[in-house]
């Protein structure tokens, strides 16, 4: 029984992390804020052009065609990124359906599941947050080596993608995903307390 609850809590934790990631990916306002904070607008000298590139990318990830990029290496990498995002979306739906069925089956243990899932998320976020500041480059490289073949994700000065997405963008993205995850974690923790009191 305990193993089942741990497994369900783990599924819920992964679901929340994926959900938080997808929220960020499709949040145009986040791209705008990062472009301003990281000096991308200043570097390009044309906010409208930069915004159009971000908007086209988000639309491409969702369902549209890629526009604004002509370099084959960048196009290839963005296609890989889109495939990864689509995989996340499929996993999101699978986990959602799975959770609905499991939470209903274990509805008498919802309090334990929600609280345990919160502590899993909290532990993961704390560890990743600390590792982010200790050695982000290692974290970034390991993530890309795991997901993308060869070195198709490596770009150097002069590439449009590198200008649009400096390293600080990804650092801030990770922090934002962890913040979203913690928010949802606190939410389910509160639900767990409410359910327990009933």
Image: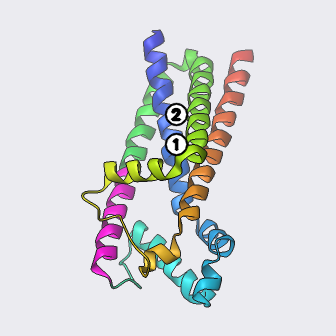
Relative horizontal placement of residue 22, taking residue 60 as reference (left or right) = right
Q: Where does label 2 land, which residue? A: 13
Q: Is residue 61 magenta?
A: no
166 and 114: which is toward the camera: 166
Give the mark count. Answer: 2
Query: Which image quadrant is residue 68 in?
Result: bottom left
Q: Which of the image's four quarters has the C terminus? A: top right
Q: Quadrant of residue 120?
A: top right
Which span is picked out in magenta? 71-88
Horizontal and vertical percent position of residue 179: 65, 46
Residue at 41% in and 67% down: 61
User: Crowdedness of circle 1 by 10 Å Cα count: few (<14), some, many (20+)?
Assistant: many
Residue named by callout 1: 17
Residue 7: image tag: none
Q: Is residue 147 left or right of residue 126?
A: left
Taking the spot 62% from the left edge, 32% from the top edge, the residue there is: 122
Magenta stretch, main secondary structure, is helix
Q: Does 54 sit above or below residue 95? A: below
Residue 115 drawn at (x, y percent): 63, 23
Mark 2 to mark 1 CA distance (whole Å): 6 Å
Q: Is residue 198 visible?
A: no
Q: Is residue 167 above or below residue 177?
A: below
The answer to the question of whether label 2 and label 1 lie on touching residues, with beta carbons closer than 8 A, is yes
Q: Where in the figure is residue 154, as x and y percent of width and height?
A: 36, 65
Q: Position of residue 47 (x, y in %)?
A: 62, 86
The residue lying toward the viewer, choosing from 141 and 52, is: 141
Q: Answer whether residue 69 is visible to the viewer in this image.
A: yes
Q: Residue furthest top?
A: 1
The quadrant where residue 31 appears: bottom right
Q: Nearer the viewer, residue 83 or 71?
A: 71
Q: Quadrant of the N terminus?
A: top left
């Amino acid at each position: 029984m305990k193993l089942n609850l741990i497994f369900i809590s783990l599924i819920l934790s992964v679901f929340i992390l994926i959900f938080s990631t997808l929220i960020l990916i499709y949040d145009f306002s986040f791209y705008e804020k990062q472009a301003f904070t990281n000096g991308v607008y200043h570097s390009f000298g044309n906010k409208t052009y930069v915004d159009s590139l971000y908007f086209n990318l988000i639309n491409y990830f969702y369902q549209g065609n890629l526009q604004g990029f002509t370099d084959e290496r960048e196009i290839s990498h963005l296609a890989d990124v889109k495939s990864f995002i689509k995989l996340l979306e499929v996993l999101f739906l699978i986990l959602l359906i799975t959770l609905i069925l499991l939470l209903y089956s274990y509805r008498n243990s919802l309090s334990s599941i929600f609280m345990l899932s919160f502590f899993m998320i909290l532990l993961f976020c704390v560890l990743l947050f600390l590792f982010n500041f200790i050695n982000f480059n290692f974290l970034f490289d390991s993530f890309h080596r795991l997901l993308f073949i060869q070195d198709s994700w490596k770009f150097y000065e002069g590439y449009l993608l590198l200008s649009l997405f400096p390293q600080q963008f990804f650092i801030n993205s990770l922090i934002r995903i962890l913040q979203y995850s913690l928010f949802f974690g606190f939410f389910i923790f509160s639900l767990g307390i409410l359910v327990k009191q009933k």
